[in-house]
Amino acid sequence: MRALDPVDALATLVAFPTVSDRPVTELAAWMAQRAEDAGLRVERFETSPGKCNVLATAGPEEEDGLLLSGHMDVVPVEGQPWSRDPFRLAAVGDRLYGRGACDMKAFLAAVSSALPDLPLDNLRRRLVLAWTHDEEVGCHGSRALVDRLAAEGRTLPSLALIGEPTDLRILRAHAGHTTMRVHCHGVAAHSSRPSLGASAITMAGQVLAGLERLQATLAATRPDGLDPLILDALENPYPVLNCGQVHGGTAVNVVADHCDLWIGARQLPGQPGEELVARVAQVCAEVQAAWADRGGRITVHPLHEAPALLTPAGTPLEALLRPHARDPRPGAAPFATDGGNLARAGVQSLVFGPGSIDVAHKPDEYVPVDQLLAAREVVSDVVRRRCLRA
């Protein structure tokens, strides 16, 4: 198999504009071909047109081993003031710029460039690569992959390395993300006679005010039963609520009869997303009660949940990563990953990868060259020590 420089691999991957509302099939085909050329058995699982997961396996099926996991999609660039073409990798100084450069195509590049140097015919444990779609919009690909494998009675290795950007720090926990739509149903009327109607937009505003009060309550409450070290590692050691979108009304001279709020709730490790949905529903019920006599109604529609992650301390993978980590102490992340869904399959994941989440999703996203190169060496070392015969 032809060796591939990790920078060249990253340039190829960035050039695929795999924004979550677009197909990932071309990038998936490239990743699949790299795995096939290295001698792995490759499967593609299409979940809808243009959307597929790639699963590549080497080594004895019956032996536990290691899963390397990453997502192929990226967030949009529209409306962002990029100083260069976001889908053409640019090397400036010690940084590599491009959409997805750190989140998380750098890890995909590191794995793809490491494969040719790994003697995969000498595996004593199973090595599995899982490349997923639509992580950025709710971890849909990993959910579908886990469900598919469970339905077929198949397993994954018990340990997974998820190469999200962590600045080469080990994270064993992260918040989840639950989304819901709050629909405020009002009564239309001429704006000169507001008493004849019920403004759904006004109701929505009261819901938002109630959510602000709920957020203050959540922030003031320290949860029980969660490792204090994990709480201390989280930037926000409490559930976080965010209203990301508001749509409502039909015209400026009409009392609005509809308004929708899209709410995201980031639940803590060990906390089910349904719990926060119920708290939001209680706020909505209180607002609805004040509007019931005017025909106002509010309904809460849960959309999807990316589960939180909490991997026990001291896994064998943690020991393998510790010599490479910037800090030997495992931490936690405020963002969600595919690790929450993988946990449903009995996989204990650690999040560790090149680049910083602080520049992810922003214009001029970048990954430091030295971290990309380091990630390649980490992949090679961890696979050798976990999966290869001595």
Image: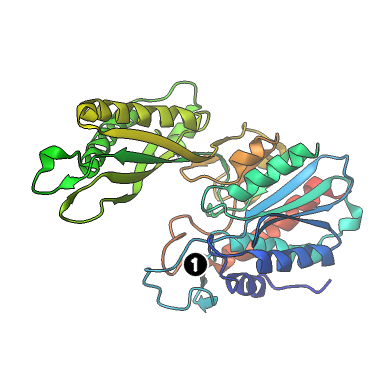
Q: Position of residue 68 (x, y in %)?
A: 70, 51
- Circle 1 Cα neighbour tier, 10 Å, few/some/many (<14 / 14–19 / ≥20): many
Is 38 on the left-hand or right-hand side of 186? right
Quadrant occupied by the N terminus = bottom right
Q: Position of residue 134 (x, y in %)?
A: 57, 54
What is the number of callouts on the image? Answer: 1
Residue under the point 81% across and 74% down: 2
The answer to whether residue 369 shows anywhere in this view is yes
How was this image coloured?
rainbow
The quadrant in which residue 117 appears is bottom right
- Most extreme residue toward the top is 224
Height in image: 13 above or below 243? below
The answer to whether residue 177 shows anywhere in this view is no
Residue under the point 65% across and 33% down: 314
Q: Position of residue 87 (x, y in %)?
A: 53, 74
Q: Nearer the viewer, residue 382 or 188?
A: 188
Residue indicated by mark 1:
366
The quadrant in which residue 364 appears is bottom left
Is 121 on the left-hand or right-hand side of 238? right
Mark 1 lies on a secondary structure that is strand
Residue type of the residue flagged with mark 1: Tyr
Is 231 on the left-hand or right-hand side of 200? right
Residue under the point 42% across and 24% down: 223
Q: Position of residue 30 (x, y in %)?
A: 72, 69
- Most extreme residue toward the left is 192
Is 86 on the left-hand or right-hand side of 296? right
Q: Nearer the viewer, residue 358 or 307?
A: 307
